[in-house]
Image (spheres, helix red, strand yellow):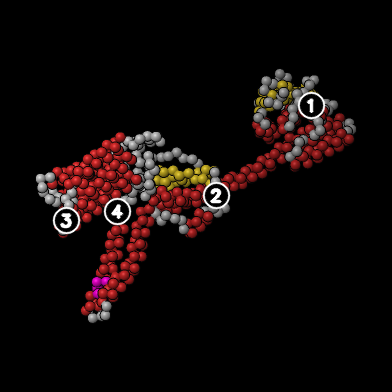
Amino acid sequence: MTAVPAGATDARRTSPSPTSDVPGEVLLALGLLALGVLPALFVLPHDRLAASADLPLLAWLPLGIAGVVAIDRVPRGMVGWTAVAVATATPVAVVVSTLPGVRGPAGGPGWVLPLLAVAAATVPARSRAQRRWRTWIALSVLAGVVASFAAWEVDEHTTFGVVASLALLGVAATLVASVLVRHPRPVREPLLEAGLVVGVLAVGVAAGGATWSFAVHERIFAAEVVGALAAAVSIMMATPAAITLRRRYLARRYGTGLLSVADLATLSGDLGRDADPRTLLATAGELVGAASGAEAVEIVLDEVDGRPGWAAFPLVVGDERVGTLSVLASHTEGLEPRQERVVRQLAPTVALAARAVDLAVAARHARSDVIHQRDAERARILADLHDDLGPALAGMGMRVEAARASGGDVDLAALGAEIAGCRADLRRIVSALTPQVLVGTDLRSALTSMVGSFATADGPGVTLVGTEVVEVEGPRAIVAYRFAAEAVTNAVRHADASRVEVRVTRSAGGVVVSVEDDGRGGPVVPGVGLTSLDARAREVGGSLESGPSELGGVVVRLVLPGAAP
């Protein structure tokens, strides 16, 4: 049971300011209590026997004080006002009944019957905690009334006075506890514990009595000592059994309250390399449910809003929140305090498990990314071989074929230089560096060199249009060069073009690289080269476009946003 901080016992309570005075309703309750108790001080008889019987008159005072505490903590609380009213009216009624000269208490144990009004004030209750406290109040009142009547029957004066006073003090203590303690234990748990204690004592008494009777019958020396020893041994032997029964009952109701070594081994075993790490969350949820006795448990690697009937506990490792532990209580009004305490104790362990799952999932994604990057690298090498070496080899092949067709000589020096460039490009492809033609020069020079590689005596006319090419640097320059080389190669090979123009111009948002031809025209069907170039263009924020050309063939454009000054 957890004590409630002042000001938190009821939603209706308003927090007073530090300089506020005692609430007026508390002063009123104290005034009424004084009016009821003070007259009894002046009229209590001096006869010792009668005074013993009248002792409960003063014992009503603690009940009224308990009511004042309830009024202070829970304004407009019916229990508090009922306790004050009963504590005020009962002594006054008794004192008035003694004024004509009647000695002793008027009505005998009937004095304690007004306690039933306190029990009646506990109904109805709006929450589980209120129902439990009002059950405790009703039981304490009932026990006090029964004990008082029994004491009156045994002894008319002294015993009744002591028992009735203790009964009133017990009810007052229960009222104060109901105000100060937010979550009382279920009534059946203390009753079970009391029953186990009585059972253990009964076993001891039965064993001791049987042993004493046997010792007396057999005329054994010190039969009383033998019986007492047998009773003590029986109680010691029965106590572990009672503790085990209590523990099993609580475990069945609230769970085991802890994670065993086997449970921790199960958690770590679910992080196997081939297993889905997210199954660890389900396993951890099952273990928390078994440990806390909750109806259901869910663990997610994210923040979760509260749901009706579910209690959410943040999972935190260091200063980082790694997930949420949601627990569904078997009772509609939420978890028992014992269950909530268990869940909070297990939350750090569950947080570490959730963090392990998060890292395992990240590692699995990283492995997938490595595989993806490897496949992408293979695709890059294929594209680079096609985009860089392809045009150069195609140009050299066209010049060789043209020389063979015309019977002329091949410029071996030029071919040797281009072959050397191809070898350098091949090394660059392997190391993912910039194309050789762009090393140490700008895009204009690279495009001029590329256009010149297609120049033959009877081949198509490939020209770089414009007196000034817009400069592009970095990855965009690589994409622009490869695009131009691929587009020119396609126009020469597949479009039967006799004229190809390469142009680099500024646009409103950046740079446009276009390649036009006067070939057959028609729709452009992207092959390996254009497909890879389209992917490269998207990586730098660009795009590819195609359409009919003013020259009669096709124009293919590469748009690179943000590349121009």
Residue at the top extreme, as displayed? 550
Kindly identify which numbered label has been placed on residue 444.
Answer: 1
**N-term-proximal mark, 3 vs 4:** 3
Eye-nearest disc, 3 or 4:
3
Picture layout, residue 241 above or below residue 474:
below
Q: Left of 430 or right of it: where is 189?
A: left
Q: Left of 482 or right of it: where is 326?
A: left
**Disc 3 versus disc 1: distance between alpha carbons?**
124 Å
Q: Nearer the viewer, residue 261 or 504?
A: 261
**N-term-proximal mark, 4 vs 2:** 4
Picture layout, residue 549 above or below residue 116:
above
Query: Which secondary structure, mark 2?
Result: helix
Residue at left offset 67%, top offset 22%? 509
Kindly identify which numbered label has been placed on residue 188.
Answer: 4
**Disc 1 versus disc 4: distance between alpha carbons?**
92 Å
Q: Nearer the viewer, residue 373 or 229?
A: 229
Q: Nearer the viewer, residue 196 or 76?
A: 76
The residue beneath circle 3 is 49
| Kind of residue indicated by mark 3 | Leu
Q: Which residues are magenta?
A: 208-212
| Kind of residue indicated by mark 1 | Arg
Q: Left of 319 or right of it: where is 476?
A: right
The residue beneath circle 2 is 356
Picture quadrant of residue 432? top right
**Disc 2 versus disc 1: distance between alpha carbons?**
54 Å
| Kind of residue indicated by mark 2 | Ala
Residue at left offset 27%, top offset 51%? 170
